[in-house]
Image (tube, grey):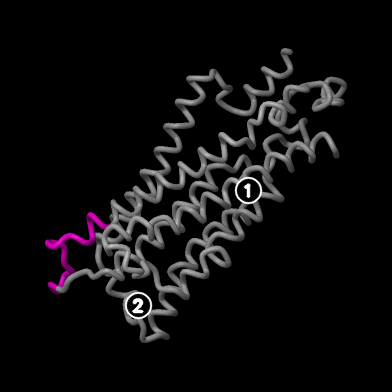
Amino acid sequence: MLFFHGREAYRRNSLLVLYNFYKNFLYVVPQFYFGFYSAFAGQPLYEQLIYQMYNITMTSLPILWYCVFDFQHKKDIDMQMDLPKSELKGYFMRNPLLYRVGIDGTCFSTWLFVKWLAYALTHACFIFFCGFWVLAQKGTHQSDGKDIGFWVCGMLVYGICIFVANSVLAYKHFTHYWIGTFFFFLCTSSYFVFFWLFSMSFKNEIGNLFAPTFAMRICWIVLFFIVISVYLAELSYASFKRLWKGEPRDEDEEEEELLSH
């Protein structure tokens, strides 16, 4: 239990710390970028009530599931390796390289902390400026000729931050179960649910804003373009990292490499 769950708990909790800083920077920093548009007048970018629900409902369950149920190596090695049981006995004890993640700071270090913060700043910049440059142009209008408006841009940026935060975490998973996938879907879709409820219930800045927002094709195009771009960047970075460092392409290759030592 110590050698298997201890290593896995260290790996998962390291990502928990880094990811929590990442996802909070991701949706807060666009408000700083917006300051350059508003001359730092204190104008909020998001509706304040839905803004408070980001950590509570929209990005909470996926990271909790990850920290408990994600495993880099399966506990039942028989399921993934055609080796006699005599060779499987003490697999983790006989492969100390598995524990270099703690010694080398592979999962958590000052450099990784800074890298995740830079990661969040880059994603936030891409989300904000891509969304605003497309939607806040003078020549961009709704189908009825009305201006798209500032609050449409802000609430769409907020929604994209939720999609990106959850998709980045999904990419970090080693194991995927249906209930984990359901949590990703539930938390991500809760953005639409609460946006609709608040739009129908309150007569504030986003009153009756939900339907006009998602009736515009350009909003869906921006949302999917940014999410897919971030995901493709993740794939490209992971592939480049493997090629540069000569890392195994998958878990089976990693296990063969460890057993050869």
- Indicate left or right for 188 with 204 as reference: right
State whether the magenta stretch is mostly helix, strand or loop: loop
Residue on which disc 2 sits: 206
178 and 11: which one is in front? Answer: 11
Q: Is residue 15 above or below residue 77?
A: below
Residue located 58% across and 59% down the image = 183
Q: Amino acid at mark 1?
A: Val
198 and 174: which one is in front? Answer: 198
Residue 32 lies, in percent from the top left, at 38, 57
Q: Is the N terminus in the top left, top right, bottom left or bottom right quadrant?
A: top right
Q: Is residue 198 above or below residue 161?
A: below
Tell me which numbered mark, 1 or 2, is placed earlier along the sequence: 1
Q: Which residues are magenta?
A: 132-145
Residue 16 lies, in percent from the top left, at 63, 48
- Indicate left or right for 245 with 95 as reference: left
Residue 160 lies, in percent from the top left, at 39, 57
- Indicate left or right for 115 with 18 as reference: left
Residue located 72% across and 13% down the image = 260
Residue on which disc 1 sits: 17
SS for callout 2 = loop
Q: Alpha-carbon distance for marks 1 and 2? A: 33 Å
Q: Amino acid at mark 2?
A: Ile
152 and 61: which one is in front? Answer: 152
158 is within the stretch colored magenta? no
Residue located 58% across and 67% down the image = 56
Local crowd at mark 1 within 10 Å, few (<14), some, or many (≥20)?
few
